[in-house]
Image (spheres, grey):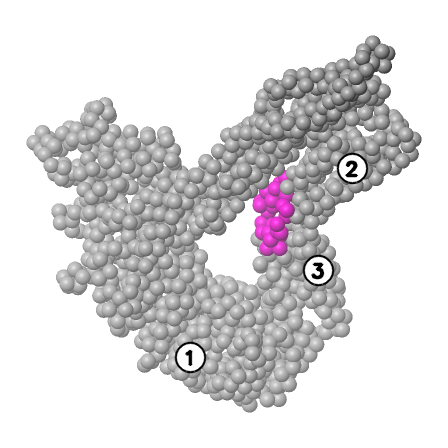
């Protein structure tokens, strides 16, 4: 006999766990991400709508959710159990679009509040026509729960007529799954034509997995074949390991097909009796409640690690993306350093200017082309790195996230930013040159701009700029030249590092904004272990 | 027999235009009596000999197809060659007949597929297959023909073979041209797209070719639906006999069952993979009924929604191969998500070859059947399926009860008309092509006009010119020229002063021309960036695979480009040494010299007067000196002015030479390959437009 003993610590652990689950995010579109997201939502729904409220109020009425495929006769069954038309039934599919909850008038207060199913808006409409008027404008009609009361429902029991689990309207499907998660007793309805369908069997397997209190109804069975179909269905259930599940058979009657008529009480008497027994008999009731609750608590043992695994996969993917960016930028950084040392900046226009210097070229012009050439080198490195990153990311499914693909017009921006940074370097270099010149004797002091141009050539020209070093030494003395060169070199390295670092950070910014961290995984597992200790 | 085959092999090249005649005269069954009398009798003789091997060849062809990536037609031809070796004379002759074509296909690869198609077209003309169909060469037609009497699977078929002359299917010209375009498209895209993307198109082509070889008199219609909807019941109702097992046990039917209303469909059923023990004949209830559905091959499928996964796989496999589908739904399940989302929505293009039947209306009272039918129509409409109402083409929606027979007659009439039209296979293939085209849309359709704009080309050239330093070189040349000119025309006093200046200053900047060879004179980063920019421009708006191809072409061209530019800059640069001088220079120098002489003369004259050697005459020497003093700078200044133009021209010339050389190099190495790649894309795009463009036309038919 399973018992349900609820301690406040358990509730606390559950709430903590709930927060952790709610905080888990799966933003990267990995193969398992949609499933993880669905699992998280389902788990959250089960915690919010069932487990926490049930453990808080063990004496609350049992909620029996009637679920099944479209056209299985769920609404007709609920109506017949209640004894009057509470849920609309009909031949057009899908029939039930708004879930209907029926309970005894005395139990009304349990459901009118937000104790269970807190994200569904309550509607108290006794007549169907008015439901539409009660909706606030813009409200999704699917996110509404209609509450009906009927004296014929035994106290301590509430019946919920859910939409189809395989509805064409996908919102309905999601809602159905959510409602079923909130149930103490799962009533799975299937029909003679459907009992081998894949979708309801999936639900049945889930029910078995969670070990909930389950009952199946084989509905709409033609009289002629009632024995055979029932036997077949029983065999299938036994094969699936669900042989001990209570099974009820409702024959197909003219009333079940048309007009939402009620089935005669005899047709559903057995089911009704069983339900009444579950609610009235304390032991049976306790058993039903405890079994579902324990089953779901047990299921956490497997579901939370699954979620944690998905969170870990997210983090691993994020790490892979980050490392692709790092590798690409590191490589380009090394290349830039090598090129700088080789004097690649002093090429093309800059080289021609240097050749013409000082006879046919002013120091200002030389400095201009050098700066431009340096900016081009850096821009080339950044775009090459970006290209490399794009290529690496193309192989990563996680990089398909819309946040990562929607890149701004990076080219022009990068050009602009690099241009600014390089010009700033030039200004600082010119200031250094002025400092050096100021210390010299006024009579022999050369033009600071000339000194700056020579220093820049030395720094950027590699071997080719050696002549510039000699000239610089002639102008401001060997000692001053060496000092200026060292300071300028440090400044250059610093600026180049900063520029590449900024570009790398910009590239990583959208990924960082997704906030994929390693913590959720550990937190989920920790919350689970706390819960296990408290049970 | 072997001798005949050999002879054919050798004779073939000598008579390339009439290969068939030789074959027929040598044919032992013809004897000598018929000779090359008429093509038709030759064929009939041929047919009887070859029919035994035909299914074998067909199966080989199917087995060989997946392995052959090049062209399914060549795959089939190869297979026929293989079959020919075993089956003797008729097919053996064919092998000889075909082998050049096969070789040509294999040798030239995908790009030759168009040419190969034409070659086969002419072959068909010679073979007299008739309608000018480019594929309808005698070979395929004959291979496809089956003589039921000899067919190994013809056990269930009892008719005498003489009645039945099975003509293969022929597609209408628009569809043929679309298929041809699709084939060329696949061939051209092989190197650019992965097999996975092209798989669907390849499958459509394979199926089109396979279906084409089989009977055009028959229409294969599958009955599909959810478990328990009454597929088998309907199947039995149409056949008039309980062929397919019905029952309450779910799922009932586990394997597809075929029922053919007339002979000659063995190949079609074989293609579906239905074994002989599951092939049936309808009840011969009456000649008129039998006649009405003549040509119908009905397939009863397992369910698609039960927990038995292998059923779903079978359904999916068979649905790809049949000509038309009857979807059976029932009042309980007609709105199932699985049916609509998994089958009806993806197959919306197949509306014209689709029947949707609401079964079990006997379970609905009164007008409820109408309501449900309307709701079903609404759902189908939401799925995007065109409904065949008011004479428009589209899916036929009917309500019936297979149990009571209510409405089955209507379905039978509709089917009879449908089968009699014999258009279903073509429509189905056309719809398949539509779907394949829609799937391929993202890899072929450009988001905007593609191509390399003149602007982008010029920008590329300008960047390359920057990389070799054309502007700076031009400016430097201009200034050097100007400097030289000025120096030449300077007044001697100024020269003297400058010389003193130089003597005083350390000799920096004197060693202007150091003719050391520069390694890496070209700015590598600029070249790299230029190539990257132009590749980005060229590939902007292209679908990903083609953009990648363009970028790769540019990257390939960029290899070695900087070195080439280095070399080129040396060649195209100005010759070292002093720049050339214009003709007026000596005059200017002379004038300058004469001015100096005037100064000297004036000065000496004055000096002479002062020391009293000469007669005092103040005016003339002063005037001479004044002319010399004023004229010297004046000449210098005017020379400077006059030198500006030539200097500018000289600089421009230097710049232009570098610029043009760089642009030429860039064009040859990068722009041309990129343009070629774009052209290739445009070619493919045009093929795709042919595949997809006609789709709109037939869709609206």
**Which picture quadrant has residue B636?**
top right
- Residue A407 is inside the magenta segment: yes
Judged from this view, the residue extending furthest toward the top is: B613
Q: Position of residue A22 (x, y in %)?
A: 67, 65
Q: Quadrant of the C terminus of chain B?
A: bottom left
Q: Is mark 3 in CB contact (under 8 Å) with mark 2?
A: no
What residue lies at 33% left-to-right and 57% top-to-bottom?
A: B699
Which structural element holds mark 3? helix
Q: Residue A524: which disc?
A: 3
The stretch of residues the image draws in magenta is: A384-412
Disc 1 to disc 3: CB gap under 8 Å: no
Q: Earlier in the sequence, mark 3 or mark 2?
A: 2
- The residue tagged 2 is A492
Q: How far from the left and from the top, in percent, is residue B559?
A: 57, 30
| Principal secondary structure, stretch drawn in magenta | helix
For the N terminus of chain B, give its image quadrant.
top left
**What is the distance, in whole Å, between disc 1 and disc 2 at their CAs?**
80 Å
Q: CA distance from mark 3 to mark 2?
A: 48 Å
Q: Earlier in the sequence, mark 1 or mark 3?
A: 1
Q: Residue at x 22, y 57 (%)?
A: B421
Left or right: where B26 falls relative to B669: left
Determine if the magenta segment contains residue A278.
no
Q: The residue tagged with tag 1: helix, strand or loop?
A: loop
A327 w.r.t. B360: above or below:
above
Residue carrying label 1: A90
Q: Nearer the viewer, residue B417 or B480?
A: B480
Q: Which mark is residue A480?
A: none
Task: In this rendered view, identify the residue nearer to me: A152 or A111.
Answer: A111
**Mark 1 or mark 2: whose residue is earlier in sequence:** 1
């Amino acid at each position: 006999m399973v018992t349900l003993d609820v301690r406040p610590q358990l509730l606390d652990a559950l709430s903590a766990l709930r927060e952790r689950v709610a905080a888990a995010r799966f933003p990267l579109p990995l193969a398992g991400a949609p499933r993880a997201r669905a699992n998280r939502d389902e788990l959250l729904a089960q915690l919010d709508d069932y487990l926490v409220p049930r453990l808080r109020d063990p004496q609350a009425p049992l909620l029996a959710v009637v679920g099944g495929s479209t056209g299985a006769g769920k609404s007709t069954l609920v109506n017949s159990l209640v004894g009057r038309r509470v849920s609309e039934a009909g031949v057009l599919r899908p029939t039930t679009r708004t879930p209907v909850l029926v309970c005894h008038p005395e139990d009304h207060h349990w459901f009118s509040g937000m104790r269970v199913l807190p994200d569904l808006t309550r509607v108290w409409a006794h007549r169907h026509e008015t439901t539409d008027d009660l909706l606030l404008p813009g409200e999704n009609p699917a996110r509404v729960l209609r509450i009906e009361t009927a004296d014929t429902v035994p106290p301590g029991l509430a019946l919920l007529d859910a939409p189809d689990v395989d509805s064409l309207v996908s919102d309905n499907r999601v809602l159905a799954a959510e409602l079923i998660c909130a149930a103490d007793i799962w009533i799975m309805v299937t029909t003679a034509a459907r009992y081998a369908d894949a979708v309801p069997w999936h639900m049945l397997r889930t029910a078995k997995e969670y070990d909930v209190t389950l009952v199946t109804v084989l509905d709409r069975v033609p009289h002629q074949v009632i024995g055979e179909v029932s036997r077949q269905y029983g065999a299938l259930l036994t094969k699936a390991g669900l042989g001990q599940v209570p099974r009820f058979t409702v024959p197909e009657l003219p009333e079940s097909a048309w007009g939402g008529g009620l089935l005669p009480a005899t047709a559903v008497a057995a089911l009704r009796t069983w339900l009444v027994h579950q609610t009235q008999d304390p032991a049976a009731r306790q058993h039903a409640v405890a079994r579902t609750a324990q089953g779901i608590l047990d299921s956490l043992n497997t579901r939370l690690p699954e979620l944690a695994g998905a969170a870990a996969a997210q983090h691993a993917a994020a790490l892979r993306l980050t490392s692709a960016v790092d590798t690409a930028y590191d490589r380009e950084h090394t290349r830039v350093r090598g090129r700088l040392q080789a004097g690649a900046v002093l090429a093309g226009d800059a080289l021609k200017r240097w050749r013409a210097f000082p006879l046919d070229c002013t120091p200002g012009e030389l400095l201009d082309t050098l700066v431009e050439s340096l900016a081009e080198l850096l821009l080339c490195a950044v775009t090459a790195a970006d290209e490399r990153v794009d290529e690496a990311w193309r192989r990563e499914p996680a990089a398909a996230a819309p946040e990562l693909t929607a890149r701004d017009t990076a080219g022009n921006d990068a050009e602009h930013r690099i241009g600014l940074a390089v010009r700033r370097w030039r200004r600082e270099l010119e200031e250094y040159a002025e400092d050096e010149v100021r210390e010299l004797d006024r009579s022999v002091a050369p033009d600071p701009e000339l000194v700056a141009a020579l220093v820049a050539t030395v720094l950027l020209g590699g071997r080719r700029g050696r002549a510039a070093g000699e000239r610089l030494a002639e102008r401001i003395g060997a000692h001053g030249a060496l000092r200026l060169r060292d300071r300028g070199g440090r400044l250059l390295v610093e600026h180049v590092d900063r520029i590449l670092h900024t570009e790398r950070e910009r590239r990583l910014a959208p990924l960082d904004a997704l906030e994929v961290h390693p913590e959720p995984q550990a937190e989920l597992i920790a919350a689970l272990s706390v819960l296990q200790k408290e049970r | 027999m072997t001798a005949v085959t050999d002879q054919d092999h050798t004779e073939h090249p000598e008579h390339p235009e009439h290969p068939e005649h030789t074959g027929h005269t040598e044919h032992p069954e013809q004897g000598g009596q018929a000779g090359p009398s008429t093509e038709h009798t030759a064929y009939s003789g041929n047919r009887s000999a070859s029919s035994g091997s035909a299914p074998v060849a067909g199966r080989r062809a199917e087995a060989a197809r997946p392995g052959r990536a090049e062209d399914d037609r060549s795959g089939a031809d190869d297979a026929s060659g293989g079959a020919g070796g075993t089956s003797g004379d008729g097919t053996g002759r064919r092998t000889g007949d075909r082998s050049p074509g096969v070789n040509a296909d294999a040798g030239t690869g995908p790009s030759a597929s168009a040419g190969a198609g034409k070659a086969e077209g002419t072959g068909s003309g010679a073979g007299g297959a008739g309608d000018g169909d480019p594929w309808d060469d005698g070979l395929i037609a004959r291979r496809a023909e089956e003589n039921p009497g000899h067919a190994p699977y013809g056990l269930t078929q009892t008719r005498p073979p003489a009645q039945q002359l099975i003509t293969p299917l022929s597609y209408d010209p628009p569809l043929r041209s679309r298929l041809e375009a699709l084939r060329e498209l696949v061939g051209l895209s092989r190197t650019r797209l992965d097999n996975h993307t092209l798989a669907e198109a390849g499958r459509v082509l394979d199926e089109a070719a396979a279906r084409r070889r089989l009977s055009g008199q028959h229409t294969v219609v599958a009955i599909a639906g959810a478990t328990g909807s009454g597929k088998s019941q309907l199947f039995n109702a149409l056949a008039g006999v309980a062929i397919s097992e019905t029952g309450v046990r779910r799922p009932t039917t586990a394997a597809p069952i075929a029922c053919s209303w007339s002979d000659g469909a063995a190949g079609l059923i074989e293609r579906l993979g239905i074994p002989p023990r599951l092939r049936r004949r309808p009840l011969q209830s009456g000649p008129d009924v039998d006649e009405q559905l003549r040509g119908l091959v009905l397939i009863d499928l397992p369910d698609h929604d039960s927990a038995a996964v292998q059923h779903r796989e079978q359904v999916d496999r068979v649905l790809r191969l049949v000509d038309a589908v009857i979807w059976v739904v029932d009042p309980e399940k007609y709105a199932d998500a699985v049916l609509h989302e998994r089958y009806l929505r993806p197959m919306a293009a197949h509306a014209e070859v689709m029947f949707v039947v609401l079964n079990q209306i006997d379970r609905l009272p009164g007008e409820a059947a109408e309501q449900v039918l309307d709701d079903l129509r609404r759902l189908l409409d939401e799925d995007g399926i065109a409904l065949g109402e008011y004479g428009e083409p589209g899916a036929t929606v009917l309500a019936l009860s297979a149990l009571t027979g209510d409405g089955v007659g209507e379905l039978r009439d509709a089917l009879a008309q449908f089968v009699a039209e014999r258009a279903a296979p073509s429509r189905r293939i056309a719809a398949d092509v539509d779907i394949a085209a829609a799937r391929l849309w993202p890899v072929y359709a450009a988001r905007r006009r593609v191509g390399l704009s003149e602007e982008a080309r010029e920008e590329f050239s300008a960047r390359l010119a920057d990389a070799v330093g054309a502007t700076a070189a031009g400016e430097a040349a201009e200034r050097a020229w100007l400097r030289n000119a000025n120096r030449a025309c300077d007044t001697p006093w100024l020269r003297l002063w400058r010389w003193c200046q130089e003597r005083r200053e350390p000799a920096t900047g004197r060693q202007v021309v150091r003719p050391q060879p520069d390694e890496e004179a070209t700015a590598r980063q600029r070249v790299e960036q230029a190539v990257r920019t132009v590749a980005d421009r060229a590939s902007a708006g292209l679908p990903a695979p083609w953009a990648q191809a363009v970028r790769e072409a540019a990257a390939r061209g960029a290899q070695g480009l900087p070195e080439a530019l280095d070399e080129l800059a040396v060649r195209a640069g100005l010759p070292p040494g002093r720049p050339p001088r214009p003709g007026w220079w000596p005059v200017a120098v002379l004038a300058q010299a004469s001015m100096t002489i005037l100064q000297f003369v004036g000065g000496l004259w004055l000096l002479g007067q002062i020391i009293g050697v000469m007669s005092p005459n103040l005016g003339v020497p002063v005037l001479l000196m004044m002319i010399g003093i004023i004229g010297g700078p004046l000449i210098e200044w005017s020379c400077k002015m006059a030198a500006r133009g030539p200097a500018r021209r000289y600089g421009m010339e230097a710049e232009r030479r570098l610029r043009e050389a760089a642009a030429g190099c860039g064009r040859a190495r990068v722009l041309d390959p990129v343009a070629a790649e774009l052209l290739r894309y445009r070619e493919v795009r045009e093929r795709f437009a042919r595949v997809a463009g006609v789709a709109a036309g037939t869709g609206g038919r």
